[in-house]
Amino acid sequence: MKTSVLTVTQLNTYIKSIIDGDMLLHNVFVVGEISNFTNHYRTGHYYLTIKDENCAIKAVMFRSANQRLRFMPENGMSVIVRGRISVFERDGQYQLYIDDMQPDGAGALNLAFEQLKAKLGAEGLFDEQFKKPVPSRNYRIGVVTSATGAVIQDIRNVVERRFPLARIILAPVQVQGASAAGQIAQAIRDFNSGDYADVLIVGRGGGSLEDLWAFNEEIVARAVFESRIPVISAVGHETDFTICDFVADLRAPTPSAAAELAVPDIRDDYAFIQTVCNQCESILLERIADDEQKLEIIRERLKYRSPSNLIDERIVLVDSLLTKALTNIQNKIYDEQAKLSAVSAKLDALSPLKVMARGYSLIKKDGEVITRSADLVSGDRLEISFSDGEKMCEVL
């Protein structure tokens, strides 16, 4: 037999062809523990070693395969992998090319849930200090859910019954499936791009962990955390929790409960208003009764201090003063008349006319009374007044 001399490349290629030709190695399941895990961030490929108590095998999981994983592999994690065995010719090393990976024991979704919960919790996304207060009286209710599910109808029924003044603004999204998380996150961002709502309800009905998975995606958690508008998470039923529940400002066990948290019961408002009206009416009636009592007291006092009584008293006083004044005036007139009569009698007794009536005359020259004959000379013209008239004469 002729001995062939092979190059290293030829040898590795030959070994690779043998291994690749073994159909049993095209689809193998291997259980083991992860070690030497490396996430090659530039290419997105995972490089790791799968080992048990005695042996180890190199493994690689290309980006096209690991993008389907719900969890992040970690050193020390026990996993079940499915893949094929082949040879990396350059290093002459056979390795496991992984197509799928599942945690050994806990499910992949449960593991992914716990990993993301731990990651976001460490970043503080669940801290109470970041929780925004959710007003109890909202007039614009933004709802991020399916347009065809029972959730939106339940929310409408509760809001219309409790607070018909509120308006519901629906952002229809898929709540299940590969594109659901992106649609939910985008709807939350759209509401925050303007003044479109006072509060957001993000939710869906109950379901399995797979059904609810969109609300466990990191993109949704960060959109809820970054929302300026308070967010009420209403995913699933009372026993179902999602990452969205932990990040939201308020968690409701059901969508109907979320609606009750978002709006007040208008019947409570009516009852409050009625109570206030009754209290006001009672206070007013008491005030009116007090004022009527005070008015009665004032009315009794006014009987003694009535303006009409005072006016009557003043009228009587004025009449009395007027009568007294008239009496005084009349007496004064009588007195003056008596004095006038006495003076008149004296004047009458001394009147020149009385004297002239007895035969005396009054002689004037140039308006001056003449009392002596010496004051006259021949030719003077005189005015002689008698009791019955006057005459002109001339001195001879």
Image (cartoon, helix red, strand yellow):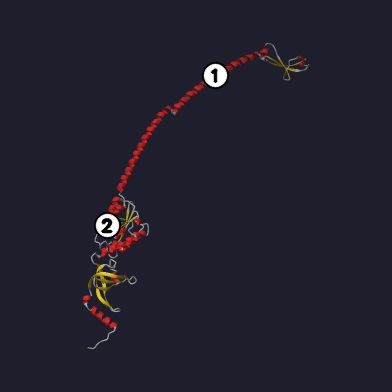
Q: Residue at x 24, y 74 (%)?
A: 84
Mark number displayed over residue 330 = 1
Q: Position of residue 362 (x, y in %)?
A: 71, 15
Q: Real-space Cα distance between discs 1 and 2?
A: 111 Å
Q: Residue at x 61, y 14 (%)?
A: 342
The residue pinned by badge 2 equals 151
Q: Would you place residue 9 above or below residue 200 in this image?
A: below
Comparing 358 with 146, the one in front is: 146
Mark 1 vs mark 2, foreground winner is 2
Comparing 259 with 357, the one in front is: 259
Callout count: 2
| Residue, far bottom | 2
Sequence-wise, the earlier of marks 1 and 2 is 2
Comparing 115 with 162, the one in front is: 115
| Residue, far left | 24
The quadrant holding residue 28 is: bottom left
Q: Position of residue 247 (x, y in %)?
A: 32, 58
Q: Residues within 10 Å of mark 1 (few under 14, many from 20)?
A: few
Mark number displayed over residue 138 = none
Q: Residue at x 46, y 25 (%)?
A: 313
Q: Amino acid at mark 2?
A: Val
Can residue 64 be seen?
yes
Q: Position of residue 89 (x, y in %)?
A: 29, 79
The quadrant holding residue 173 is: bottom left
| Residue, far right | 378
Q: Residue at x 41, y 29 (%)?
A: 301
Quarter occupied by the C terminus? top right
Q: Amino acid at mark 1?
A: Gln
